[in-house]
Amino acid sequence: MEALTRFLCSLQGRLLAGLAATWLVIVGILLMLAWQYGKALVDEVNLDHLRDESRLIADALTEKVNRRLHALARLAPGLQGMSPEQLGDFLEHNQALMEWFEGIMVTGPDGVVLADWPVVEGRAGLDTSDTEYFRMLRRSPAPYVSQPFVGRASGDNLVLMLVPRIDEQGAFSGVVGGMVNLAGGGLFRWLERSWLGEEGRISVFSASGQALFHPRRANSQAFNGLPALDLALEGWEGETVARGVNGESTLMSYRQIRPANWIVKVSLPRSQVRAPLGDYLVTLWWAWLGLAVLLMFSMRWLVRRLLEPLHRLERQIAQVGAGERRYLALSTSMEELRQVASSFNRLEHERLSALEHLRDRQAFLDAVLGSTPIGMFVADLKGHLNYMNPALLELLGLDASCSASEWWERIHPDDRQGTQDMWRHSLLTGNDFMRQLRFHHQDGVTLWVEVHASQVRGSDQPLGFVGMVKDITERRQQEALQRWEAEHDPLTGLLNRRGFERRLEEALAEYAKTGTPSVLILFDLDHFKPINDEGGHALGDEMLRRIAQVVAWEVRRSDHVARQGGDEFAVLLPSCTLKQAGEIAESLRRVVSEVTVVNESRVYNITLSMGVTAFQEGDDAVETVLARADAASYKAKAKGRNTVVMADPDDESLVDSLW
């Protein structure tokens, strides 16, 4: 009765809370959808804006560069045949060019500066033949814009815009160059007035990635490491969304300034682009929340009137529980509540009968489970263990008072997470739970157990889970031994051909997927037959075991060593270059040559004929790699044994290396 009282008292609150939660969920979903679709729309609109902005800037800079280059090109023919003094006078009186350039210089065909204006001490007579721009113009007589450099006189960042001087015979006769001040000149000054919001940026880079203009820096510096910028430096132009220098997601647009081989970058942080949308949605959220509060007050009055008959029903049920009434007699016009009262009277009688029957069945079940020799347990629908029979407690070394956390802590850490995930899945779906896992016994022994639990249903309703636990430790140990024997050589303990080829297939698949380099070494034992013939197979087996021991000791822990059969061995070196493999092969050749066995005072030793090959493009089967390594080992035999022969990965021919 007390629970019903609490239910009726809180029903009104839950109804109101449910209505409010439903309203908030609907509003939240609408706001999230608006945010998701709005983000994409805002990004698309701003990318279009950046495309237009970057195109306008690139076109304007292209025109400015072309005007300067054309002015120099018109100046160059009039300089032919002038002496250095005449050139200086001519430049001094041609002040119109100084509107575009901070300085003009003229060189001869040998790269020596003949004249400059304004005159800078030491510039006339300067040899520029070793500069990159002079060599470029001499080879290809076309206008050229140099990389940025620091001017000797001004200390500012400058670039040279240059055109070749061609004489009447069409021969190269020198260079005319104009110096442009990147910081104080008019080429980029107008960009300072461009407005892209608080965080929007306009930058200009050279083809080498050096910044020519950036409003946040006084000096140029390299901005490498941005994938989109790296593509733009190779000639790409377009729009993208990527991480900026500070790691923030940014909208970017790149355009090429072809005459100067420069790149314009216009960028806007996504946070700035999406800020207005976020502010609008926050305002909308508060407006809807205010509306929800108004609705709550009106719904509270309505719900209170609807729940009044339930409060009368609650009072009569409390009287039945206290013995003050024998049945419910509810006076109400609500047919549903009258049916509830009738059902309550009937169910109260049936409840008492069912409780008595349940006690009898529980006693019978406890007797059955307690006497069975198989470990069994009972769990409820939430997964809590309600019962473990004596056989299970003895098997696992637990006592009846152990908690659920202790049960899970006894499971081996490598098996615990998977077991918990599968158990939760069975509880959720009702499917059988079956898993083999390791369990720590209180005696310190680790058991392998098999757990099988099934859902129990009654009247088409799930009641809980009943499970069995079996000790399979001996069976698992036997299976592990059989798996080891199937892939290992019984004489040496190394991998056999089957086990080695499986690992070779895995390494080849990894190479095809990720390009991870691996190397295969095959080698035969030189002069092994006399050991078997003169000392017998026992002596030969001893030599094979010793060789296997030193080879396994010499290679890395991640490498795989196998005895292919007879006196044939193989080594797989995952994640290894061909150069490293050559050093390992030489080390193996050296240490194996020091292995000896003795028979009747005669000392026997052997050498190795080794073939080495790396995985190559086109290797689609292990047979291809094995055949290439085998051919290299045969060539080592032909070279006189005790030799390492490596397959060339470029032309697939064998190049021998005599160590």
Image (cartoon, helix red, strand yellow):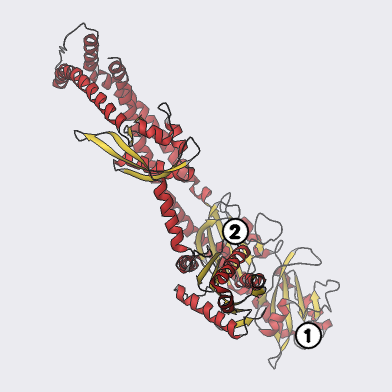
Numbered badge on residue 389: none
Displayed quadrant of residue 234: bottom right
Displayed quadrant of residue 244: bottom right
Q: Which residue occupies the extreme bottom position in the image? A: 169
Quarter of the image for the N terminus: give it.
top left
Mark 2 or 1 closer to N-term?
A: 1
- Residue located at (50% from left, 45% from top): 275
Mark 2 element type = strand
Q: Circle 2 is placed at which residue position?
A: 202
User: From mark 2 to mark 1, how far is it between C-alphas?
Assistant: 40 Å
345 left or right of 514 in image: left
Amino acid type of disc 1? Answer: Asp
Q: Position of residue 331 (x, y in %)?
A: 15, 12
Displayed quadrant of residue 95: bottom right
Of residues 347 and 21, the one nearer the viewer is 347
Q: Position of residue 156 (x, y in %)?
A: 76, 63
Q: Circle 1 is placed at which residue position?
A: 110
Mark 1 element type = loop
Is residue 425 something one can see in this rendering?
A: yes
In the rendered image, the vertical position of residue 137 relative to residue 565, given as above or below: below
Q: Residues within 10 Å of mark 1 (few under 14, many from 20)?
A: some
Of residues 18 and 617, the one nearer the viewer is 617
Q: Position of residue 360 (x, y in %)?
A: 22, 22
In the rendered image, the vertical position of residue 588 relative to residue 332, given as above or below: below
Is residue 59 something one can see in this rendering?
A: no
